[in-house]
Image: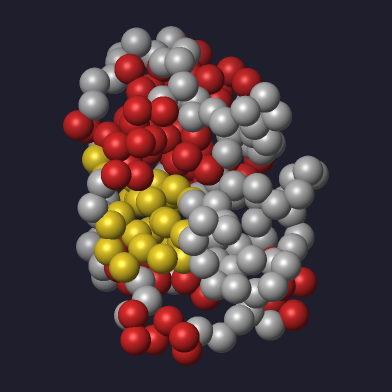
Amino acid sequence: MFDLTKQEMCAFRELSTPGKIQDFLDALPMNGEEDGDTCHSPRWVLRENRAHCIEGALLAALALYLHGEKPLLLDLKTKKTDQEHVVALFRKNGYWGALSKTNHAVLRYRDPVYKTVRELALSYFHEYFLIKNGDKTMLSFSRPFSLELYDHEWMTSEENLFGLAADLDDSPHFDIVPSMNRRLLRKASLVERTAASIPEWRGGIRG
């Protein structure tokens, strides 16, 4: 199915709920991109047993798709001083949730309690700050980005999916902070920054 091997299908068959998918993502070591930027397919992630945020989101989207859900991504854009984040969206009983691969203590899984994608995206705003100075960096979020627009190559490609990542980055985004309120943003406090500095995997905060 979709050129996936029996072994790959068996792995995805076990990832039958958002909770199980998130547990799988949490157990994956981080892909620290030691040799440069990557955007690997779910096949690569399963084989190499590591991922960063968009790679984890792609795997999560495929797992959801194979269990009858829409394969949707959400892009969270930031100031140039920070790294953007990508999560996979899911919907249960009319409410949105998100699956997230991250090395942060925050920017993680979201339960399906949000009526709109905007509500969900806003839940990341106060957690999205620079540890060194507390500057809040999240600027905008994308529309739900459907992977059904692509052929099935994104599931199994051995090449980096930079084109897909660029399409997501270029897709319509919505601003978070009203322009007249930008100067009113309060920096994250020392206790918030200290708590957020704990990485899940060795090698520092990434993803």
The answer to whether 89 appears left or right of 23 in the picture is left
Q: Does residue 72 appear anywhere in the picture?
A: no
Residue at the spot 31% in from the left edge and 68% down from the top edge: 175
Residue reaching furthest to the left: 149
Residue at the spot 67% in from the left edge and 24% down from the top edge: 35
| Viewer-closest of 38 and 61 | 38
Check the picture and name the quadrant holding the N terminus. top left
How far across and down, in percent of the image, does residue 95 sit?
29, 64
Q: Does residue 32 appear anywhere in the picture?
A: yes
Residue at the spot 45% in from the left edge and 33% down from the top edge: 59
| Viewer-closest of 196 and 137 | 137
Label total for image: 0
| Viewer-closest of 102 and 47 | 102
Q: How is the image coloured?
A: secondary structure
Residue reaching furthest to the bottom: 184
How far across and down, in percent of the image, does residue 22 sit?
53, 47
Residue at the spot 49% in from the left edge and 52% down from the top edge: 84
The answer to whether 81 appears left or right of 191 in the picture is left
Answer with the quarter of the image where residue 135 lies. bottom right
How far across and down, in percent of the image, does residue 10 sit?
47, 20
